[in-house]
Image (spheres, coloured by chain):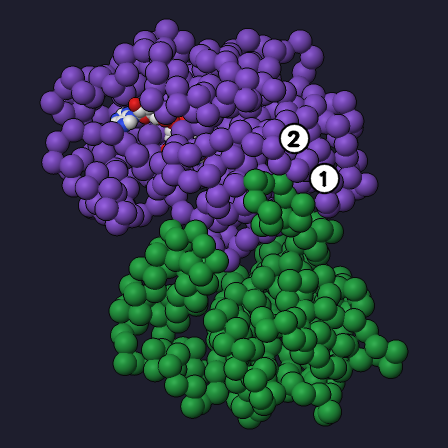
Amino acid sequence: MASSRTTTALREIRSRGEESWGEVRSGQWSKAASAVVAGTLMSLGLRRRSLGGTVVALASGALLYRGLQGRKAHRPAAGRETRHGHAVEVEHTLTVRRPAEVLYRLWREPSTLNLLMVDFAQVTTTADGATHWEIQEALGRTLSFDSRVVEDHPPELILWESTKDSAVKTQGWVRFRPAPADFGTEVTLHLALSPPGGVVVEALAKRMRAIPAMRAMKVLRRFKSLAETGEIPTLDHNPSARVRAD
Amino acid sequence: MRALCWNGVNDLRVETVPDPEIVNPHDALLRVTMSTTCGSDLHFIDGYLPTMKAGDIIGHEFMGEVVEVGRDVKKVKKGDRVVVPSFIVCGNCWYCDHELWSLCDNTNPKPEYQQVAFGYPTAGIYGYTHAFGGYAGAHAQFVRVPHADNDCFLVPPGLRDEKVIFLSDAAPTGYMGADFCGIQPGDTIAVWGAGGVGLMAMRSAWLMGAGRVIAVDRFPERLAMAERFTGAETVDYSQVESVVDVLREMTGGRGPDACIDAVGMEAHGTGPGYAYDRAKQALHLHSDRGQALREAILACRKGGTLSVLGVYGLMDKFPFGAIMNKGLTLRTAQQHGQKYMHRLLDHVVKGELDPSFLATHHFSLEDAPRGYEFFKQKKDGCVRAVFTS
Ligand SMILES: NC(=O)c1ccc[n+]([C@@H]2O[C@H](COP(=O)([O-])OP(=O)(O)OC[C@H]3O[C@@H](n4cnc5c(N)ncnc54)[C@H](O)[C@@H]3O)[C@@H](O)[C@H]2O)c1
Ligand SMILES: [Zn+2]
Ligand SMILES: [Zn+2]
């Protein structure tokens, strides 16, 4: 039953001209080979128990998905995305056990986005109703931009875009559709991002390229837990004999 | 507070760590009154399960007294004496609602590992690998219990800790393993592994109407326990040419109606298959030693049920053809403790189940590394070491 109703779909879509990942995906490596290589990388990464190891594991996890999903990943989900030509686009779906109306309202609550993005960005609402994003970077710099809801179809779809004068070009949407039986609502999150020029480009693009699918997955997972239980599972203040306890 | 920490393969130490705090509104804090060792811990102590981090507090089988509750906790109160299943559940998701508790969707703060390794993340566990959430464990003076109303079970008055502690993990696991067998009155159930989990599966099989229970292990004291406390017949696999042949002869040439694997990825074995597994595992090629599971598959009667409780990672030379061609039903899971807790407490209160015989060795928390040494080496007939602080 569960397998015929795939409740989680993970797709990554990138614009043309994206060399390395694109090649891996589109045929130079067979599906099977990339899955095997990814599986090996993954176990190496997981075994090393270091941050580097984790990154290897996660990056190769994304590779594993691509290996398993093959060329299907090239098909754009909707016309809009590829026209924009964003550097990174990712889409992820989860089923949440609440009605669409409740989920729509929760998503629009001013405090929600910040809770979902907590380890990635600070999200606040500006005086004129825009959403202000601040992304902390590896280089200790902060990247900030504003976005605005440009399409709003309660309780089905919310679409936002970065404002014209933003340094970062981004677009995102979240869609709520009824799931079969007693599963609740299928929630799809779509994120697209083109980093600005300069030094920041590289750092951010690299970071986003390594784990964008995982990022979207975690954001949706947090949303699901918040909607279903009223809280988000956390390791804050988790005791251990380490300095940082996560 | 003091807590038992994993610092690397075979390196456990009791250290001073920060106290846990209420973090989420449904949390409770427990003062741990008793905790115990589990065979699952050995898999990461020995380095066969990835995603441990040096400094992790371990331990997932425990009970204690509630000392503080978060603002949205409704049922559980300060002062309650409770036992807590090892898997953390939310009580609200589709899986919880369908009694597939260990598959809960909302308690693993690190879903990325399992999303990659298994396709979808499962619930979190206390004191286990980071793929299962990385929560601080219970071999400590205090522990944080998320979703306390769904995870803390009130202990009926008058029961000693030793009678209740194993309802956290070993007993529900064994009980679930027997439940998976769909036992018809008179069925013959064979159980590989006479550790805490296997022994609980044997006792549970009787409670569910089995006609015969057969224990397979090689440690005389564990086999003796199987006989004495669960009434099982025993097979010492180190003393026979072929366990499969012996079981076939014991069952009129049919094979057991259901076979339970309570051994897992570090099965000990004899013969060339074992040498192959052992060599691969030693080289960290990450495949399991699967002797017990392979035997269970071959021994099971046609159309029978295979109930797998042992923890596995990757296994090769897996005789799937035998499962397919013999039409076996395969049932397996991490334990759904919340499903069985009330039934188990009821059995204990009525005197039908007394798991306290598993607690062969007592240590103080400060002495926990020695407790694990006894447990792992099965020194002095140790089946479970229990810790009190
Ligand atoms: N599914 C769950 O939720 C769950 C919960 C707890 C434990 N477990 C798993 O169950 C397994 C058993 O746990 P435990 O705490 O009883 O462990 P344990 O280490 O105390 O006992 C394992 C027993 O298996 C025996 N054994 C080893 N090789 C054997 C073989 N080839 N044939 C027969 N017996 C053999 C050992 O001698 C030992 O007595 C472990 O893999 C553990 O990880 C699963
Ligand atoms: Zn356990
Ligand atoms: Zn749940």
Give the chain coloured purple. Answer: B
Callout 1: helix, strand or loop? loop
State whether residue A137 is above or below residue A237: below
State whether residue B59 is above or below residue A173: above
Parent chain of label 2: B
On residue B21, which mark appears?
1
The residues bearing labels 1 and 2 have C-alpha atoms spaced at a distance of: 12 Å
Q: What amino acid does circle 2 point to?
A: Met
Find disc 2 in the rendering and name its residue.
Answer: B1
Q: Position of residue B97 (x, y in %)?
A: 61, 44
Which of the 4 quarters of the picture holds residue A67? bottom left
Parent chain of label 1: B
- Determine the residue positioned at 48% across, 49% down: B131
The answer to the question of whether label 1 and label 2 lie on touching residues, with beta carbons closer than 8 A, is no
Which quarter of the rendered image does ligand 1 occupy? top left
Image check: B114 left or right of A127? left
In depth, the one of A118 and B107 nearer the eye is A118
Image check: B17 left or right of B372? right
Q: Position of residue B370 (x, y in %)?
A: 44, 21
Callout 2: helix, strand or loop? loop
Give the chain coloured green. Answer: A
Q: Position of residue B374 (x, y in %)?
A: 39, 19
